[in-house]
């Protein structure tokens, strides 16, 4: 009887936690169009490392992003209308983004000042993924087009992991 009661409580706890994570997630704008254009697994075993020096955010500190056994790679075209945004999210692995048209501003959940970093046409950036929560937003009056390559996506899984609003930004 006690075991049954504990099992029922555990099941209810899991259900509440799942509901809370969905309720707290911040979906992107409904008018942002994100199209997966390609997906593939590596034919050979891959051990990928990036060293990123971001003087603006880390005052010259180098971030090392390591993917010891890279899984699937997904390529996506994303078009943001004026004011369009991704909502707060992270990625399973690193993401390499290239701005093809317009300007995209990236906001990081670990920045209490909410100072977004804009990236314009012809610029690229790397998001570390692996739990780094962020949001991208088109702050301009024109459409923005971005092409993103996501590394280390679980086979058949999503390159996006929804996250709760960290409360650091007010738009």
Image (spheres, helix red, strand yellow):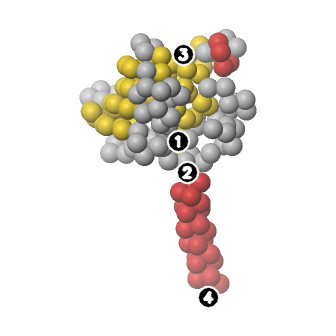
C-alpha span from label 4 to label 1: 45 Å
Measuring 56% from the left and 41% from the top, which residue is drawn there? 88
Q: Quadrant of residue 148?
A: top left
The residue carrying mark 1 is: 87
In this view, the residue farthest toward the front is 141
C-alpha span from label 2 to label 3: 30 Å
Q: Mark 3–mark 4 contact, CB under 8 Å?
A: no
Measuring 50% from the left and 34% from the top, which residue is drawn there? 83
The residue carrying mark 3 is: 51
Q: Mark 2–mark 3 contact, CB under 8 Å?
A: no
C-alpha span from label 1 to label 2: 8 Å
Q: Nearer the viewer, residue 51 or 137?
A: 137
In this view, the residue farthest toward the bottom is 1
Q: Is residue 50 above or below residue 72?
A: above
Whichever of labels 3 and 4 marks the residue nearer the N terminus, that label is 4
C-alpha span from label 4 to label 2: 36 Å
SS of the residue at dot 3?
Answer: strand
Q: Is residue 160 above or below residue 9?
A: above
Instruction: Inspect this view and state whether residue 66 appears.
Output: no
- Percent across and percent down for residue 6 are 63, 77
């Amino acid at each position: 009887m006690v075991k049954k009661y504990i099992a029922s409580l555990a099941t209810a706890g899991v259900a509440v936690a799942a509901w809370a994570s969905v309720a707290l997630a911040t979906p992107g704008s409904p008018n942002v169009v994100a199209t997966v254009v390609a997906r593939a697994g590596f034919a050979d075993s891959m051990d990928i490392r990036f060293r990123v020096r971001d003087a603006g955010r880390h005052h010259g500190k180098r971030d090392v992003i390591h993917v010891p056994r890279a899984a699937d790679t997904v390529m996506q075209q994303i078009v943001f209308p004026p004011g369009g945004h991704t909502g707060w999210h992270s990625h399973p692995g690193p993401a390499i983004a290239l701005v093809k048209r317009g300007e995209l501003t990236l906001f990081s959940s670990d920045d209490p000042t909410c100072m977004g970093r804009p990236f314009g046409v012809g610029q690229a950036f790397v998001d570390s993924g692996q739990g780094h929560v962020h949001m991208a937003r088109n702050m301009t009056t024109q459409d923005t087009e971005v092409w993103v390559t996501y590394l280390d996506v679980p086979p058949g899984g999503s390159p996006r992991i929804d996250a709760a609003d960290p409360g650091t930004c007010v738009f």
